[in-house]
Amino acid sequence: APAVMNFTLNFTITNLQFTADLQKPNSRRFKSTEKVMYHYIDSLLQKSSVGPHFTGCKVTGFRSGRDRDDTKVDAVCSYKDNASLARFDREKLYQELSTMTNNVTKLGHYSLDRSSLYIDG
């Protein structure tokens, strides 16, 4: 059976004001924001080179950004590692996500900090 592999995905949203309830996984705001993140992140990753092997992401947290209006998003995403996936190429995935987010500026109705996208295999 193919092994399940993880990678982290981090980015900063510049038009989502960070509030204390975003740090509480049981809060209503955390859950609703998490749901929106899944919707956007999953659809991007399904269209990427890891798409056929992609199994999902889990938001691990929201953190305060440099400005009051910035919220950092941390997620762990998974894919099934098998022979048909040459190897996880984080640079290629970075390029794909960068292109799909309009050079790391847009994620749905959110604005992104251009220099905030980070993928770690």
Image: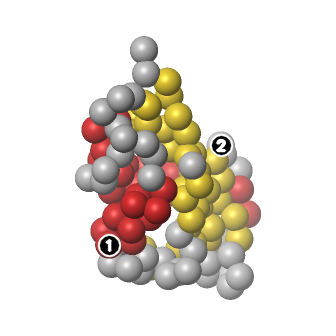
Confirm whether residue 19 shows in the render: no
Q: Quadrant of the N terminus?
A: top left
Confirm whether residue 26 shows in the render: yes
Task: Point out the frontmost of discs 2 and 1.
Answer: 1
107 or 4, which lies in front?
A: 4
- Is residue 54 found left or right of 73 in the rendered image? left
Amino acid under disc 1: Thr
Residue at image point 51% right, 44% down: 77
The residue tagged 1 is 99
Query: Which badge, 2 or 1, is on the more N-terminal residue?
Result: 2
Task: Give the x, y percent position of residue 57.
Answer: 48, 43
Residue at image point 43% right, 42% down: 87
Residue at image point 59% right, 55% down: 120
25 or 86, which lies in front?
A: 86
Task: Kindly report the distance in space between the C-alpha atoms of the residues bearing marks 2 and 1.
Answer: 33 Å
Task: Give the x, y percent position of residue 88.
Answer: 45, 46
The residue tagged 2 is 26
- Is residue 22 found left or right of 78 in the rendered image? right
Residue at image point 50% right, 82% down: 114
- Is residue 81 found left or right of 67 in the rendered image? left
